[in-house]
Image (cartoon, rainbow, N blue to C red):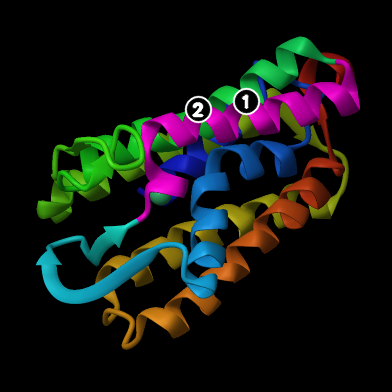
């Protein structure tokens, strides 16, 4: 899953209004943000197998430290703990931590059985990536729903908040469609380096969030 993770982060704004969208993006995508780093340093491995699944050419050979359920919970507790230490906001910390775990939960229906429950443990996955229509439908519902929920929960106070937000939403949608319908990456190592640009969504999300206010606060 890709856009759906952003959708959940956007939807979470209502539940924890004081948390920056950048932090919510970081939580929901943390596993995929750490993953390319671990690929580059050689802790985890992926192979690109064109045609492996209709909506994904990735053979996730080894990724227990980012994509096992146990480690997702550990990352969630770490990030939630850091958030609590910094902000003293238990509700916000719990939601950010839960977003980290939500990444694994949303990946579970999409991946073939390659997601470990714990490092070295049994692997699970429902394999919905075998169907492009189902994949696109789920991504669209989650991302579209989240984008709408964020737009409704907040109000822009300038063009960065309004147009900037529109551009961000369109960019995520187009980026995702180009991943699904574009040619598979030629080389796993180069793909890992390119995937690092995903980190940019954190400052960009925080930047746009600063130019929007909660609707209740504005009213
Ligand atoms: Zn993932």
Quarter of the figure with residue 128? top left
Location of mark 1 (residue): 77
- Horizontally, residue 204 falls left or right of residue 1, namely right
Location of mark 2 (residue): 73
Q: Is residue 126 above or below residue 85?
A: below
- Horizontally, residue 198 falls left or right of residue 142, namely right
Give the dominant element type of the magenta stretch: helix, strand or loop.
Answer: helix
Secondary structure of the residue carrying tag 1 is helix
Secondary structure of the residue carrying tag 2 is helix
Residue 73 in the image, given as x and y percentages of width and height? 50, 27
Residue 134 in the image, given as x and y percentages of width and height? 16, 44
> Which stretch is magenta?
63-88
Disc ID at residue 169: none
Residue 218 in the image, given as x and y percentages of width and height? 88, 21
Q: Is residue 113 above or below residue 182?
A: above
Q: Nearer the viewer, residue 85 or 111?
A: 85
Q: Quadrant of the C terminus?
A: top right
Q: Is residue 184 above or below residue 219?
A: below
Q: CA distance from mark 1 to mark 2?
A: 6 Å
Residue 189 in the image, given as x and y percentages of width and height? 43, 82
Q: Is residue 161 visible?
A: no
Seen as rendered, the residue at the extreme bottom is 186
Instruction: Please say if the residues under marks 1 and 2 sit with CB atoms less than 8 Å apart.
Output: yes
């Amino acid at each position: 899953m890709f856009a759906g993770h952003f959708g959940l982060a956007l939807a979470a704004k209502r539940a924890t209004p004081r948390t920056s969208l950048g932090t919510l993006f970081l939580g929901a995508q943390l596993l995929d943000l750490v993953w390319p780093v671990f690929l580059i340093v050689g802790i985890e491995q992926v192979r690109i197998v064109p045609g492996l699944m209709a909506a994904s050419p990735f053979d996730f050979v080894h990724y227990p430290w980012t994509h096992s359920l146990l480690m997702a919970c550990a990352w969630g507790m770490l990030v939630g703990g850091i958030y609590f230490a910094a902000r003293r906001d238990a509700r916000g910390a719990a939601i950010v931590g839960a977003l980290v775990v939500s990444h694994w939960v949303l990946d579970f229906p999409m991946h073939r059985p390659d997601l470990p429950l714990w490092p070295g443990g049994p692997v699970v996955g429902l394999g919905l990536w075998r169907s492009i229509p189902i994949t696109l439908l789920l991504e669209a519902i989650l991302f579209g729903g989240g984008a709408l929920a964020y737009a409704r929960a907040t109000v822009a106070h300038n063009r960065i908040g309004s147009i900037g937000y529109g551009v961000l939403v369109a960019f995520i949608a187009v980026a995702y469609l180009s991943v699904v319908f574009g040619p598979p990456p030629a080389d796993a190592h180069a793909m890992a380096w390119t995937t690092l640009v995903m980190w940019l969504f954190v400052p960009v999300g925080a930047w746009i969030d600063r130019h929007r206010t909660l609707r209740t606060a504005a009213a």
